[in-house]
Image (cartoon, rainbow, N blue to C red):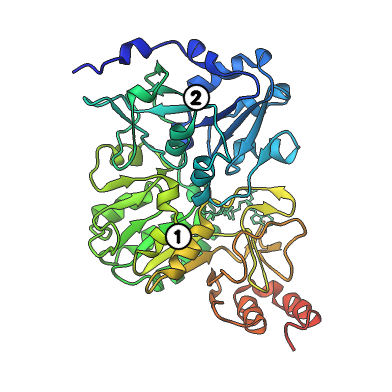
Amino acid sequence: MTVPNYKSKVVTAEEAVKVIKSNDTVHLHANSAYPDVLVKAMCDRYKELNNVKVMHLTTFHKAPYVEPKMAGHFVHEALFTAGNVRKAINEGRADCYPVFLSEIGWLMDLGRMPIDVCMLHLSPPDEHGYCSFGVSNEVSKTAAENAKIVIAQINPKMPRVLGDNFIHVSKLKYIVEVDAPLLEVPMVDANASEEEKKVYQTIAEYISSLICDGATLQMGIGAIPDAVLPFLKEKKDLGIHTEMFSDGLIDLIDLGVVNGEKKSFMPNKVVSSFVIGTNVVHDYIHNNPLIEFRSSKFVNDPVNISRNDNMISINSAIQVDLSGQVCSDSMGTRIFSGFGGQVDFVRGAMRSKGGRSILAFPSTTKNDTISKIVPMLTPGSGVVTSRADVQTIITEYGIADLYGKTLRERTKLLISVAHPNFREELEKQAREFKWLW
Ligand code: COA
């Protein structure tokens, strides 16, 4: 069956991007749904365009609009900072938003993040004319709903992922047909040394000890959340409500460990808003009735998260001070990543009956030369999870449950899970602060 109006909208990428004007804000589809062909055509026009804002969450392709020669033509505004735009941000050639992932969609709906052009990467339309947002719904569906103009590259290699994850062809101004494999992103710990893997394993075992049968899980971004999954094979009836997942989840579903049967909210569904992984997970989610993609404003809403009983959130951190303030997005003033959904899930898990939020990380980095538990955050560091929100901290040295604890109790607990080489100095500093006596 042919979709009415489809053919009349098909143009070249060069034609499609002519809708972009100087001073426009352009939103790009994220993760492996990055609309690479449209972005190339937009950047090829750079000499004709001035002050075009380019906004998006995590992407893994090269980002030509942050190259020094694009200054004045394009300015990137990161909704989450990934490796491809980090240098530009830290050299003052691009900007970023400190923002909860749950709130980006609301900001768009409220008109506080106006979007002129939304560029998408979609699956071909079904017989009713609906294209799937594929591997990545996040804030891109909301951006498309709010944008003045939507243009899309349509790719038969983009999986058709179910849920509230579709847009009708009638909403698209122009369509560019492409047929190309999606970018694959390997698991984070693929390059880890044997030593690092041992540390991840110890941390994963501590995390696993806090997960009961029937729990619902969120896994954030980074090496630790990825490392936990293989240690959950003995669990039963787990559920998933998570902003993202990767290849590692598939084994647990195949083994019947993850089945969603005990979920108190949206049972029998893996609720998520994007994947980051290889074609193994891209193929797995295609037309899979278990997978329910929704926008980040739904999935990351702390109220929705808390409707899952026994909700366990698992995220990581860059630095934690002795009072429990957690920095996850910067190293001092140097921006490294973003808020993402960390606080959304910390708060949602805390409000869930039987729930718990976990922040887990190796006690040190750079070959044991830097402690991640510090007396004070490095000046300029952003507090992502506040010390009033923080609950359970895990390193390879154990579990520190900070929830409802005094400053003195927290200090002791955090020193007990710091690397032994740093404990004496941490204790000395804590005594100078009068946090220990
Ligand atoms: N001081 C100096 N460097 C540090 C550091 C510190 N305290 N902590 C980490 N680093 C460096 C590491 O040495 C590593 O450097 P390298 O790439 O040169 O090896 C790099 O930063 C990455 O650190 P690592 O610990 O391997 O990070 P990760 O991949 O496990 O991710 C976060 C950890 C915190 C960066 C990641 O979870 C994140 O971006 N979080 C954002 C907030 C969040 O949790 N959102 C929810 C999901 S989106």
The residue located at (60%, 80%) in the rendering is 413
- In this view, the residue farthest toward the front is 110
Horizontal side of 47 relative to 309 (left or right) equals: right
- Tell me the residue that label 1 is attached to: 302
The residue located at (35%, 30%) in the rendering is 158
Q: Is residue 74 above or below residue 133?
A: above
Horizontal side of 100 relative to 32 (left or right) equals: right
Query: How far across and how far down the image is residue 409, in percent?
Result: 63, 84
The residue located at (49%, 26%) in the rendering is 148
The local secondary structure at tag 1 comes to helix
The answer to whether the residues at label 2 and label 1 have Cβ atoms under 8 Å apart is: no
* Badge number at residue 257: none
Horizontal side of 178 relative to 393 (left or right) equals: left
- In this view, the residue farthest toward the left is 1
Question: Closer to the camera, 41 or 370?
Answer: 41
Residue type, label 2: Asp
The answer to whether the residue bearing label 2 lies less than 8 angstroms from the nearest atom of ligand 1 is: no
- In this view, the residue farthest toward the bottom is 437
Q: Nearer the viewer, mark 2 or mark 1?
A: 1
- What separation in Å lies between label 2 and label 1 (alpha carbons)? 33 Å
* Of callouts 2 and 1, the N-terminal one: 2
Which quarter of the figure has residue 390? bottom right
Q: Is residue 122 above or below residue 298?
A: above
The local secondary structure at tag 2 comes to helix
Query: How far across and how far down the image is residue 185, in percent?
Result: 46, 39
Q: Residues within 10 Å of mark 2 (few under 14, many from 20)?
A: some
- Tell me the residue that label 2 is attached to: 36
Residue type, label 1: Pro
